[in-house]
Image (cartoon, rainbow, N blue to C red):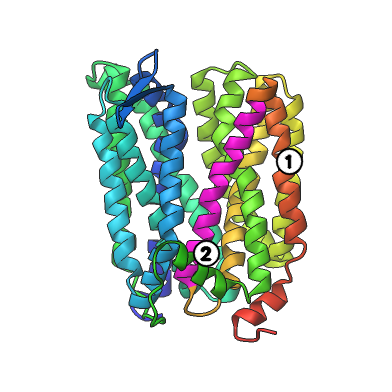
Amino acid sequence: MGDPSKKKAWFGWCMYDWANSAFATVVLASVLPVYFVSLVPAEGARLSLLGLTHTLSASALWGYGVSSSMLLVALFAPYFGALADQSGSRRFWLILFSLGGSTATSLLVLAGPGRYLLAIALFIVANFSFASGNVFYNSFLPYLAEEKELDRLSARGFAFGYGGGGLALLLVFALIQGHDLIGLPDISTATRAGFLATGLWWGVFALPAFVLLQEIRPTETALMPAGFHGYLRIFAEVRPYRDLLVFLAAFLFYNDGIQTIIVVAAIFAREELGLSQTNILACFLMIQFVAMPGTLFFGKVAEVAGRKKTLAVTLVLFIGVTFYAYFIREAWQFWLLSVVVALIFGGSQAISRSLFGALIPPGKSARFFGFYAISSKFASIFGPLIFALIADLTGSARLSILALATFFVIGLLLLSRVDVTRGKAAAKGGLP
């Protein structure tokens, strides 16, 4: 690499994870979902379309908002990736989506009582920008690190993310709890101020990435068309790389389980164990800070034992988590379970990203990471849906949690069929 130096570029890349993880912890996972419920009337949100009126509960409207933003990412991520590969514009698009997402997050300060439609619209824009920006952020990875350094840099990025996300959540939590000490009239106002602070956090701490990351020279000449034809072309490019394709399938399943656990953890703790909101939020804070050393630890283990073996260990532990969750009854057991999840969550994500990066052929990182993003976003749709259906049919969230073990088992079996050495050779031009 030229100027800036590798060390500075690594720092800038990691700082983007520090910046946008504030959105993941505050808006996506913890504070906004709870606040959104307070905005929707008790009788539900009445929506009219083409003369038809339908009433949705707060949870249903929130779920549709999450699904809509993920669907948009799934539709457009391959196009964005191809555009970056063809034009060498990764940095430009990263800046654009970062500023768009941080602005939409900040504007949530305007979503006062009863303004649930504004809140869900801004959330969709922010979440779409968050996930789309990550396509370009991830695509820098193979260009910033040598093959032997991928695990270290990927793990470091996740560790920065847990630190930044955890500190941002702590800041917002303190703002809400101590609102009267700083002259804010009520918790609702303090919560909206927290959204403004989160958006500013994202925008300001992303500046090092904007300054220190350099554009990657364009390597593609054919721009992939959008929509279904684009998917077909991308699939045609991925299909010859057998081990890469099998790994993507494995990732689709086990990431489905991982993301679902994160999304439903608070609901499980509240409904099945009766934990207070303060207790749950404190647990989320703990997860952020325990996940940081856990991510770095598993990154080091992967360098010694290999990515595939280390990833397989984390999936076995996730299977154990689902079975243990079925039997727990006390708050301390939930905290113990959360510690385990915190230790293995970041490691599994970081190793997945670096293993995928090692299997990508030169010049295709952005568009292949677009496919990677599709797997991630679709995973976040189906897992919660299965969880909800089982809970609805059986009345037990415990059975829903237990059912998630299936995703990890299938992912583990598919991962066992990935030949990493053969996959790397194929990526370097040695396709059989």
Per the image, is 93 magenta? no
Q: Is residue 315 above or below residue 11?
A: above
Query: In percent of the image, x 51 and y 62: which residue is there?
Result: 371
Reading the image, the residue beneath label 2 is: 153
Q: Are marks 2 and 1 in contact (CB under 8 Å)?
A: no
Q: Nearer the viewer, residue 171 or 103?
A: 103
Magenta stretch holds residue 384:
yes
Q: CA distance from mark 2 to mark 1?
A: 30 Å
Q: Does the image show residue 190?
A: yes
Q: Which mark is residue 405?
A: 1
Report helix, strand or loop for mark 1. helix
Please name the amino acid that badge 1 sits on.
Ala
Q: Is residue 298 left or right of residue 18?
A: right
**In the foreground, 382 or 303:** 382
Kind of element beneath mark 2: helix
- Start and end of the magenta stretch? 365-391
Of residues 415 and 146, which is closer to you in this image? 415
Q: Residues within 10 Å of mark 2 (few under 14, many from 20)?
A: many
Please name which of the two marks, 2 or 1, marks the residue nearer to the observer: 1
Sequence-first tag of 2 and 1: 2
Residue 166 visible in the picture:
no
The picture quadrant where one finds residue 416 is bottom right
Q: Majority secondary structure of the magenta segment? A: helix
Give the farthest residue toward the top. Answer: 42
Q: Is residue 432 above or below residue 124?
A: below
Q: Residues within 10 Å of mark 1 (few under 14, many from 20)?
A: many
The amino acid pointed to by label 2 is Leu
Vertical relation: 69 (above or below) 94: above
- Image quarter hosting the C terminus: bottom right
The spot of residue 73 in percent (x, y) is 42, 53
Residue occupying image coordinates x 54% and y 76%? 146
